[in-house]
Amino acid sequence: MLNTWVVAPTCLPLVLRRCHSCASERFRPNGKFRVNANHKLLDAWLLVLCTTCGDTAKLTVLERAHVRSVRPELLDRLHDNDPGLAAELLQEPGLRRRNHIALDWEGAWRLDTGGSDHLDREVIDVSVRFAARIPVRPVRLISEGCGLSRAEVERLIKDGKLVSAVRLSGRLSGDFTFTLKR
């Protein structure tokens, strides 16, 4: 029987970027946007607050976009300060690249294993699904989901008792499956 685990965000991740006021490197997105119109051109920013000094920084969402080229529903979501839109935009590689930022997901996600009935089986097949592109070490997920230490998970991989079609070292942010034989 295939078990499905889901890695889901619990809040917005921290934004890693240098603060110009205090040299801190962490900003908290609060889901607020600023939209500015200059004749027929729009600029839009996602506002983030420094976790140390509280200074506000702007992440460019739209820059000099012609008003007719912006979908009306996007504009409505920007004006409504839609926190779901903030989460979607932070997932976009283009926005992160344009603003020279990275995301810190530490403490901003949870693993839902659907219960612990799988822990007593000899062989378990697990499909891990990501609700958002959250880079997580598979060893950490497996250790948390199966109630094992990370060293034990590493040993199971080395012994060939934990197998997957993807490499289990490093970080993953996409769906994968694995089989654990005890």
Image (spheres, grey):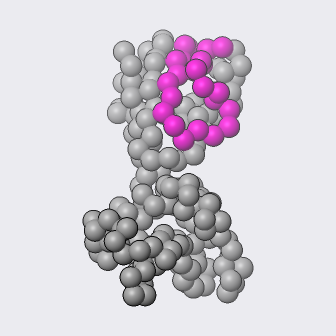
Camera sees residue 48 = no
Q: Say which residue appears at 36% left-offset and 75% top-offset.
A: 67
Q: Main secondary structure of the magenta part?
A: loop
Camera sees residue 126 = yes
Q: Say which residue appears at 41% left-offset and 74% top-offset.
A: 66
Compared across the picture, whether 82 is left or right of 51 comes to left
Q: Where residue 107 sits: x, y (%)?
A: 52, 56
- The image shows residue 135, relative to residue 88, as above or below, that is above
- Residue 35: quarter of image: bottom left
- Quarter that holds the N terminus: top left
- The verdict on residue 117 being magenta is no
- Residue 159: quarter of image: top right
Which residues lie in the magenta part? 160-182
Q: Say which residue appears at 58% left-offset and 34% top-offset.
A: 138
Compared across the picture, whether 120 is left or right of 74 comes to right
Q: Say which residue appears at 63% left-offset and 40% top-offset.
A: 171
- Quarter that holds the C terminus: top right
Q: Nearer the viewer, residue 152 or 94?
A: 94
Q: Where residue 14 sits: x, y (%)?
A: 55, 64
Q: Where residue 24 sits: x, y (%)?
A: 68, 76
- The image shows residue 35, relative to residue 135, as above or below, that is below
Q: Where residue 149 sits: x, y (%)?
A: 62, 33
Q: Nearer the viewer, residue 31 or 140?
A: 31
Compared across the picture, whether 108 is left or right of 4 comes to right
Q: Nearer the viewer, residue 127 or 157?
A: 127
